[in-house]
Amino acid sequence: MIRSLIHCAAPQRATIFLNPLRRVHSAPPLPRQPVPDLRKTLTHYLRSLQPLVSEEELESTRELVEYFLRPGGQGEELQRQLHKRAEKTDNWLTDWRQECIYLENHLPLPVHSSPAVILPQQEYNDWRGQLRFASKLICGVLDFKAKIESPGGLQELWRGQRLCPDQYYKFFGSYREPGIKRDRILFQPRNKPHHVTVCKNYQFFELDVYNSDGSPLTEDQIHQQMLFLRAHSKKTDKEPVGVLTTDHRNSWGRAYSALIRDRLNRESVRSIQRSLFTVCLDATALKYSEDLYSSRTAAQMLHGGGSHANSGNRWFDKTLQFVVGEDGTCGLICDQATADASAMLTMLHHVFNYCSEGPSLQPPRTPLTRVPPPRKLYFNFPPESKQHIEQAKRNLDILVNDLDICCFSFPDFGKKFPQRYKMRPGAFLQVCLQLAYYRLHGSMCATSEAVSLRAFHHGRSDIVRCSSPEVLEFVQAADDPKKSAKEKFSLFVRAVESHQANTEQVLQGQSVDGAILALKMLCISSGMALPALFMDTSFAVSSHWKLFTGQVSAPMDCVMCYGPLVPDGYSVCFAPSQDSITVCVSAFDCCQETDAERLSDSLQGALRDVHSLVLECRPGDE
């Protein structure tokens, strides 16, 4: 039940510890992200291959590594170029990751790229409560924006270290413009945007949120604007133009070029691009049983439910889309080309706290000039654009029907349990997930876990490779009747410690995949041939992420969901609270080998079995 589920837990797809933002007046510069040692990087790479490939394939890859690392060889030259790049750029990895993972990815943003965050169910259940809550939410976001732009700025701490605040300044007014070959990010001057985009019944409005003197509108002022907007958006026979943004990026790029040839369309799109963020006022979704409510709500937030539901009430190119449903559902859809979910969650924490407070006691300000009513954005639809909309609707409905999401709350224990035994919850859960997958599929697979690198100057995120010899040894022994409980427990502890070490390595900037991506990009930019190391079978197998995972610990109740990275894979997001764990698993129905519900069942069994194993072998420590 997501009603209780989202009240007991909190994707990025990353392990993030969010501390309260603190005001600071000066601070030393953050450290630059180090360039990983090439030999150590490839040693870690070979270790991650051991559970995934045959001994013959592994030996072949070892030979390719040694050839790549030979004195005077290609590896040495590429490493020299990487050090040179690191000296000349703010961060040698961030721009390349943004370009390769997001801007050059042609897959649709919903499901494949933009995660959704589901916030706790609100207490209203009609349009009146919806508009009142949306008005307060807008005020909360503007309050966060004012704080990050205040003279002293704000500081976020993690493990006693400052985190890079750069992403916060890119939230507002940013836009991912589609392209036929690649997308690009549009930014607005920091003080220029003065309006938000509001979507209602597939119709879009420009709503000013600042008075003529630069002060933000009050909650009551915004609420009056919302009432006006609702009165002028009652028609429900409009073309769902927003559904165009759900299509494959190259298809949307062609449709975009055709759409903005019309002057009226171009002006409407420009208004959306220049807005601070988008607020989607959704109609009530279909009713589901309590058993399905959590999973269906997650799907509804992630993609809108399809062309006949709320998907046309979106504009996925905007970095921030706040969704406020008439039935009390609310959440956020975020495009990660500009900012990672870790930073989004910090902002959401502030906004949610703001919304939880009572009515403002400040007297309303009298604006110097009357605030104009919301301006409706109109579109013309020539035959070509109508065809593009119909095609986007068909593609979206195929995607919506293909996605299988299973959300559940695991009540037996939470993050306090592994912490009691000096194990980090993220590593504990990751090893349990590997056991669940192994039991279901009979082998391990390439698994990535996203982590934040915001401890570095302009750092974004990177991934931990979760496959290791220690994890393989444990999952093979877990159901072996010849192994004693003590032997199994010892192997489990080694697997957890191995994952913790791999995670620390990435958090220190020593990432395998970040370094490999940089070497490949250097080859492309300099016209070199790609090394044979990056073209062999082992590399393809180890980069086909059948499990894409994340674990978020946040100081608020929320659930995050996103789609798998590959057609035959899963996504798994953990949200552990002190005494329970919320999990969101997704897979695609088109693949007969994957099943979100079966993996969820296997994961719950693995969690209980490991829990029993720990208690059996360490009873005195409880």
Image (cartoon, helix red, strand yellow):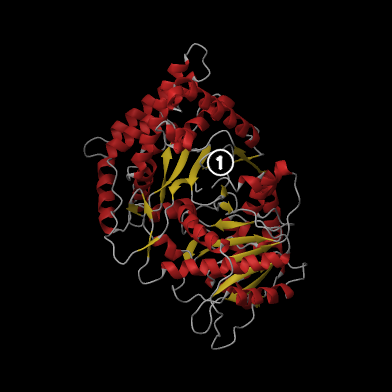
Asked if residue 476 is positioned above or below residue 554 in the image, the reply reads above
Query: What x and y, as percent, mark residue 248?
Result: 60, 54
Residue at figure coordinates x 32%, y 44% from the top left: 508
Residue at figure coordinates x 38%, y 35% from the top left: 500
Q: Is residue 164 left or right of residue 216?
A: left
- Quarter of the image containing the N terminus? top right
For mark 1, does the 10 Å Cα neighbourhood hold few (<14), some (14 to 19), or many (20 or more) residues? Answer: many
Q: Residue furthest top?
A: 482
- Quadrant of res 70: top left
Asked if residue 81 is positioned above or below residue 544 in the image, the reply reads below
Residue at figure coordinates x 38%, y 31% from the top left: 498
Towards the viewer: 369 or 378? 369
Query: Tag count in the figure?
Result: 1
- Inspect this view and state whether residue 1 appears: yes
Q: Is residue 586 left or right of residue 36?
A: right
Towards the viewer: 49 or 547? 547
- Inspect this view and state whether residue 443 appears: no
- Quadrant of res 450: top left
Query: What x and y, as percent, mark residue 528?
Result: 34, 47
Q: Residue furthest left?
A: 71
Residue type at mark 1: give it: Ser
Query: What x and y, as percent, mark residue 375?
Result: 64, 78
Residue at figure coordinates x 53%, y 76% from the top left: 362
- Quadrant of res 328: bottom right
**Residue linked to disc 1:** 571
Towards the viewer: 363 or 97? 363
Q: Residue furthest bottom?
A: 368
Query: What x and y, as percent, mark residue 587?
Result: 61, 40
